[in-house]
């Protein structure tokens, strides 16, 4: 029986059988109204044997007080400072009772049956470690935000299916990475991986976690049966480029063998040209963030190498297997619209196609 059929049977089975103990973890920072909406949505669609944990990252908008007043059944963890997404989630794990851990953004709303469907692949296949939902745009519910993430050859991560019609991705399938907005993971896997990389703080945490899990031999899948709505918008915050670029470099340094990184050098050089071009075009006020990312890597080289040693000790697949699931195509439309994005796609994607083919020809380890 195919996995999709098994999972379909599991979903029906779970309609009458109690789920395994599950913990829903939400990290919040100054999003009180959105968080309350999220919790209201979750509370209307939560089965027995599930708990909800909110980690408040020292919000100044009264988020924690509002949760205590309106949702006394929620386990509230108050952090004395803003820990970021990864460390905030890690803080909740020791207090969580669930065998499965579900991570949800505070600016999401869920449909009934979302959690049963999200956990069904984990119940059906012991090799599946992470499952991500069909995430739709909250203000355009007929359009996709992300059906998992696509990882480019150079480690750049993009929303899979952004802007596509709601029913475009209707098949349960493996994906490069889960979306941090809504995904489930086996507790034992998260503990094996030592949790989220807390140095990420913001951005790329989901991609980094997914890559490490896949390198350790686990599968990462998307299910169309679990629907979550996300208040998503493409925006550039002052430190976004710093966090995204720094975290991408760290992920690559931890995950890939040195010969692979050497062979990928031309592709990475091209990616640097593109990201520098994007900064000069769209984020010139924060130009120094690219340089700051380089400096952080140099200053923290020893710590990164320690993390690399741990990641490599868990390796169960080859670099070739990991890279075969990467994409050569960059969706420049997710960074900007108009003729510039079209021209960039026309120029750079064919070059990345050739570089990826060459890499896969050479890399046999």
Image (spheres, rainbow, N blue to C red):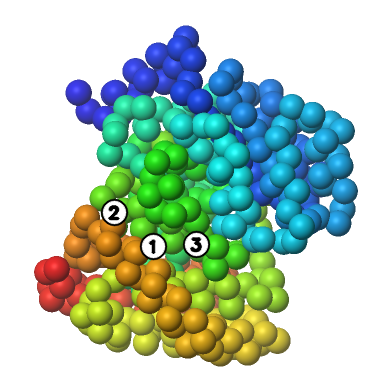
In the rendered view, does 77 fall on the left or right side of 131?
right
Q: Please identify the quadrant where the C terminus is shown.
A: bottom left
Work out how far the residue at label 3 is from the one at label 2, CA to CA, in angstroms. Answer: 15 Å
Q: Residues within 10 Å of mark 2 (few under 14, many from 20)?
A: many
Q: Nearer the viewer, residue 353 or 184?
A: 184
Per the rendering, the mark at residue 331 is: none
Q: Position of residue 80 (x, y in %)?
A: 76, 57
In the rendered view, does 282 fall on the left or right side of 5?
right
Per the rendering, the mark at residue 216 is: 2
From the viewer's perspective, is residue 283 above or below residue 235? Answer: below
User: From this viewpoint, is residue 244 visible?
Assistant: yes
User: Quadrant of the rendered structure where residue 266 is?
Assistant: bottom left
Q: Nearer the viewer, residue 177 or 277?
A: 177
Instruction: Say which element carries label 3.
Output: loop
Per the rendering, the mark at residue 151 is: 1
Badge 3 or badge 2: first in the primary sequence: 3
Q: Nearer the viewer, residue 103 or 328?
A: 103
Q: Position of residue 299 (x, y in %)?
A: 51, 87
Q: Position of residue 83 (x, y in %)?
A: 67, 61
**Pair 2/1: label in front:** 2
Q: Residues within 10 Å of mark 3 (few under 14, many from 20)?
A: many
User: Quadrant of the rendered structure where residue 140 is?
Assistant: top right
Q: Position of residue 192 (x, y in %)?
A: 38, 49
Badge 2 or badge 1: first in the primary sequence: 1
Badge 3 or badge 1: first in the primary sequence: 1
Residue at the top extreme of this rendering: 16
Q: How many marks do you count on the picture?
A: 3
Q: Residues within 10 Å of mark 1 (few under 14, many from 20)?
A: many
The residue carrying mark 3 is 197
Q: Name the residue: 80% across, 55% down.
A: 59
């Amino acid at each position: 029986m195919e996995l999709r059929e098994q999972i379909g049977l599991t979903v029906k089975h779970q309609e009458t059988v109690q789920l395994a103990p599950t913990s829903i973890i939400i990290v919040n920072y100054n999003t009180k109204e959105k968080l309350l909406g999220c919790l209201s949505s979750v509370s209307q669609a939560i089965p027995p044997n599930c708990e909800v944990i909110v980690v408040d990252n020292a919000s100044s908008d009264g988020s924690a007080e509002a949760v205590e007043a309106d949702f006394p059944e929620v386990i509230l963890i108050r952090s004395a400072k803003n820990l970021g997404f990864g460390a905030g989630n890690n803080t909740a794990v020791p207090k969580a009772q669930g065998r499965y851990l579900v991570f949800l953004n505070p600016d999401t709303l869920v449909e009934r049956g979302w959690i049963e469907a999200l956990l069904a692949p984990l119940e059906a296949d012991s090799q599946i470690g992470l499952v991500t939902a069909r995430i739709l745009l909250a203000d355009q519910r007929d359009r996709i935000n992300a059906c998992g993430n696509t990882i480019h050859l150079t480690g750049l991560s993009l929303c899979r299916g952004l802007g596509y019609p709601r029913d475009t991705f209707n098949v349960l399938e493996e994906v490069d990475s889960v979306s941090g907005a809504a995904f489930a993971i086996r507790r034992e896997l998260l503990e094996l991986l030592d949790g989220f990389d807390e140095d990420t703080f913001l951005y790329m945490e989901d991609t980094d976690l997914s890559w490490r899990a896949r390198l350790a031999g686990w599968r990462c899948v998307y299910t169309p049966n679990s629907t979550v709505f996300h208040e998503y918008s493409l925006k550039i915050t002052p430190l976004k480029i710093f966090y995204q670029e720094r975290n991408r470099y760290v992920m690559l340094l931890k995950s890939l063998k040195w010969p692979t990184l050497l062979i990928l050098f031309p592709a990475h050089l091209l990616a640097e040209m593109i990201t520098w071009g994007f900064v000069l075009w769209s984020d010139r006020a924060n130009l120094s963030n690219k340089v700051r990312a380089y400096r952080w890597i140099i200053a923290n080289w020893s710590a990164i190498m320690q993390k690399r040693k741990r990641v490599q000790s868990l390796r169960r697949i080859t670099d070739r297997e990991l890279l075969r699931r990467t994409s050569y195509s960059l969706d420049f439309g997710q960074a900007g619209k108009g003729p510039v994005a079209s021209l960039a796609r026309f120029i750079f994607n064919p070059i990345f196609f050739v570089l990826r083919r060459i890499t896969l020809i050479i890399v046999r380890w």
